[in-house]
Structure formats: C-alpha cells, structure tokens
Image: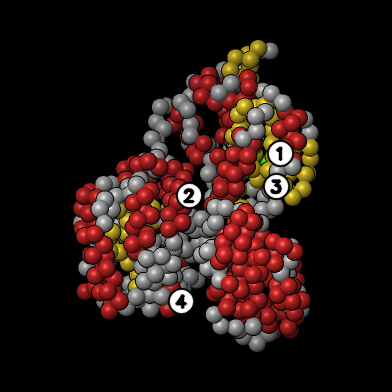
Amino acid sequence: MNSQLAKIFLEIAEYLAMDNIPFKPAAYEKAARGIESLKKDIEDIYREEGLDGLEKIPGVGKSIAEKIEEYIRTGKIKYYQELKKEYPVSLLELSSVEGLGPKHIKTLYDKLEIKDLADLEKAAREGEIEKLPRFGKKVQENILRGIEFVKAGQGRMLLGSALPLSEKIKQRLEGREEAEKVEVAGSLRRMKETVGDLDILAVSGKPEKLMEYFCSMPEVEAVLAKGETKSSVRLVQGLDADLRIVSAESYGSALQYFTGSKDHGIKLRRIAQEKGLKLNEYGIFKGEKQIAGQSEEEVYETLGLKYINPEIREDAGEIEASRNNKLPKLVNYDEIKGDLQMHSTWSDGSASIREMAQAAKKIGYEYIAITDHIGKLKIAGALDEQEVLGQWNEIDKLNKELDGIKIFKGAEADLDEKGRPEFSEEFLSKFDLVLGSIHSKFRMAKDDMTQRLINALENPLINIIAHPTGRIIGRREAISLDIEKVIEAAKENKKILEINCYPDRLDLKDQHIRIAVEKGVRLSLGTDSHSPDQLPYLKFGLAQARRGWAERKDIVNCLNLGELKKVLTN
Ligand code: DGT
Ligand code: CA
Ligand code: CA
Ligand code: ZN
C-alpha cells in the first residue's frame, strides 16, 4: 500500500504542476517521499494510531493525512480522480522521459491529445511535435532519444527498491516452519544496479504448503504459474518473482546456477566438462553419480576454483583470477568508516546537521562530510558566502559538542562549462573537502565535456568529482565522456572519483569503477543523503564498488579519520 500511495501523491504533484499551482506540488512530493521511506505498512499505522499517526509521517499534514485515510477506507481518493478526469494522461509514464516537464505534458495533451508514451512516440516520429510553439526540432529529437532510453529500462527495478522488497519476502518465507532454507539468487544476489525479476530458492520438507503460501502472500498481485517445484507471481510493486523448491542435496548447485550470470555459469559448465564431469542445477556428476552440489563452496572447490563472490560473477575475468588464486579481496561493509556526501537543511536536505551526524554515529561511523550545495543553484537551495560562514560556525560547535563523530566542512560546487567551480577561491580553499559536480549543460560535445572534467581535476581546490557521469538510471543518459581520459587525469592529479550511492545514480558505475581500480585511482562513497533514513544507501554504492573489484585500499572511506585528513590536505 505504501508504494501505491506514494505513486498517487507523486502523480497529484505532477497534475498540480501542470496547472502551475505554486507550492502544493512540492508538498505532495514531500509526502510521497515520507511514505516511501516508512518501514511500517501505512495501514498498520492508521489502524493503531488513526489520523494522528498519519500526521506524524514526515511531510504529511492534515489534508494529506485525510486523503490517506480516504484511500485506506475506500480504496480511492476523490481529489485524485477529479484531476485524472480533467487530464486523462499517464503522467508518470510521460514524465519519465528526460526533459518532459508537467507544462510540456499539458501542451502535448491540449494540442495533440497525447496521453501516453505510445502517443508521444507516434507524434514525434510523424514530426507533429516540432510544429508546436516552444518545442522545435531539437526538442523533438531529444524526446525520441528519451523514449528509447525509457523503453530500454522498462520492466526493471532499481536495486534500491528491489533489495528491501526481496528481504521482506525472504523474511516472510523464512518465517514459515515448512521452509528450511531460503535465498534470493539471480541479478539481485549479484547486486546489479537494476533487477529484472526475483529468483528465489528454497528447501522445504513440505513443498506444496510453501508454494501455497508463496502464491498467497500479500504482495502477490497475480499468480502467473503454479507448480509443484516452481511458481511465478507478479508482485504489486510491478516485479515478477519465481520460487523454486529444490532438494537439500542440490541446493548449492541450484544457488550457483540461478545466481548466474548466465555467462559465468556457462563457463563453469565447460570447466566441468574438461574435467570429465557434468555440472547442472542439480549438482556435479561423475557419470550417474552426484559428487558435489550441496553447497556453493563445494561446487567451486570441485571445479578446482577458489570461491567467487556473487557480485563479480559476470565472466569478466573472475574465473581465470580464481583459478590462478588472484581474486581481489573485495571491500567489505564493515570496513567503511564514514560517508562523504550528504545534505542538510542548510541547502536542500530535510534534516539538521546535528540529526545527520547523530544518525551517522549510530551506524558506527567515525566521520561524515556535510556537502551542501554552494553557489547559484537556486532550486537546490545553494549557500552563498554569508551562509557558509554561518554553517561553519554551526559545524565547529557540533564538533566540540559531539563525541565520537567528526563532521567535515564539505561543499558541493557546481562546475561551469569550463569545469570551474562557481564560488570564491578564498572560500573554497577553507573547506575540508570540495566536491565538484556537473548539474547543468549536460549535452556538451564529448571532447569539451571530457576537458571540462579534466580542468576540474587539475584544480587544486577540488578534492572529489561527484557523480562523474551524471546519469540517472532509467531517466537521464550519462554525459558523453571519454571516461578513460578522465580516470587518467584523476590519477595524474591524485584526485578522488565518487561512487554516488543514491539508488538511481550509482555513478561511477561498476565497469567504470573497475577501470579506476585497475589504474589505481582512489574512490569515495557518498550517499548524497537528504535525510538520515537515506544513509543506508551506502550499501548500494558499496555493492557497485565490489562489482568493480574494489578492495579496501581503493576506497577512501576505509581510511580512519587521521589518514583521511592527510589525503584531503595533500
Ligand atoms: P535479470 O533477472 O534480468 O535481472 O537477470 P538474472 O541474471 O537474474 O537472469 P534471470 O532471472 O533470467 O535468470 C536467473 C539466472 O538463471 C541467471 O542469472 C543464470 C540462470 N540462467 C537462466 N537462463 C539460463 C541459461 O539459459 N543457461 C544458463 N547456464 N543459466 C541460465
Ligand atoms: Ca532475475
Ligand atoms: Ca528469473
Ligand atoms: Zn549533486
């Protein structure tokens, strides 16, 4: 129910923005975010605490609480239905096309009756859109590119949403007495940035009963196939999930097989054949006799390989490395000592510096960097020099007051088209750490864009390039960039590249991380949190670091406070 409601509120926000109504869209967006971040089911909150409980949700005031109540009681929100009647368009679908805002969508509906992606594509292909005032040929081309991009990502869910969902389902199944073992395999176990479906494995003494339960879980929207050992369901969150029940003797082989990747699995099979063995999802066989398969470790061992972590099973050299005992010792979550990008109420965050610091301390971190926007970025509430002084004052006080956590004075500075930070040099030199970020002019030519970042990397006032490629998964393409040259420049100038951990960024991505690691360029993890509940996003960035073969030495967040200070002042 939470994610459905959040979606409705996001849609209401878009409807209101179409009509140019001030402030209200932001209020609905905030409520949507508040609901999305709830750990508890919103129906339970309402049942236990009524309207008062709903009003305690971050971003939810009286009027929105009443709408939530209406939805829980009647399954509908009248206000929403009236908006929908006025503009019968698939708003979230259309606004997923990069560059299409609510006002464009209104024009497209008013002039061309465009309701969804299919209408939009047709109109763009027929050249109808360029004829509209304020659109033009360029916009039409961008729309077509945006549509291609959205279509390519459709049907996949961000790891950031799929992982919590899979954990919930795993817990449900594990809670059944008929379940002996449950594991989620597939791309999710490999921690890929997006996931096509969930591949769940279980061992059970009463498979029928477990299947029955799986098909009737509250998250199930439809049962696509139901069998004795395999069933498939569509979840209300829009993702499909398969459950396969396997025998304990085959569990390891099944886990290995269904974790994939497919190419990794195919190569393992070939290795088995070379040894005169047969490998499949049931085990390793010599003739008719099963000789291994109960555990994954056993499967790798029998093939003469060192165990390979799921994150790097992509047939990208890991099998050879395993055979030669040259596997990386992947960085671990418990080696992370801090978070190097987050925002506070000073710019566009929703919590105070104190709240962020306390939440970080609770996680067990030694330090954080507060990296509010500085400069001219109005929408993100960027700080001017006067405000920066006020913020430093507050950080100094907190650092005196709070024990066990150090707050770095950081900043996220916009880079102009030449890669120059738009802020006074005198101020920039006094921050503990400055992130340089591209937040505008995303469409420069490749050479110019590459030079833009190289210039920033050569600037002694900048420590880290944040979200270096600017992509937003499923929404915005990466800037066009010669990534190898940028990594080379980072190396030459002893600079750090960020792995932004925000679920729809994950930027640098796994393949780029691998190049940086090979070149010996250091990387930083930053969650880009805008509230304390986003600090756990770190695990998504960390997973990409592991997928990029990063070790402890590659990640500056593994340095202790003293070591990190040295790196930042160099
Ligand atoms: P996804 O769901 O698109 O994010 O990616 P995966 O990797 O989870 O792929 P999926 O769900 O189609 O299949 C799960 C695993 O099952 C896959 O990683 C490897 C294994 N698998 C599927 N089809 C084949 C196949 O034809 N041959 C082999 N060797 N393995 C396969
Ligand atoms: Ca899958
Ligand atoms: Ca599957
Ligand atoms: Zn940014």
Q: Which mark is residue 379?
A: 4
Q: Which residue is mark 1?
A: 214
Q: Is residue 450 visible?
A: no
Marks 1 and 2: which is nearer the front? 1
The kind of secondary structure element at disc 2 is: helix
Q: Position of residue 142 (x, y in %)?
A: 60, 72
Marks 4 and 1: which is nearer the front? 1
The disc, 2 or 3, on the residue closer to the chain's N-terminal end is 3
Mark 2 vs 3: CB contact within 8 A: no
Q: Which mark is residue 540?
A: 2
Q: Which residue is mark 3?
A: 218
Q: Position of residue 402 (x, y in %)?
A: 26, 57
The disc, 4 or 2, on the residue closer to the chain's N-terminal end is 4
Q: Please tell me which residue is depicted at 33% across the width and 62% down the height of the picture.
A: 354
Mark 4 vs 2: CB contact within 8 A: no
The yes-or-no answer for disc 3 within 8 Å of ligand 3 is: no
In this view, the residue farthest toward the bottom is 133
Placement of 199 over or under 349, stated as above or below: above
Q: Residues within 10 Å of mark 3 (few under 14, many from 20)?
A: few
Q: CA distance from mark 4 to mark 3?
A: 39 Å
The disc, 4 or 3, on the residue closer to the chain's N-terminal end is 3
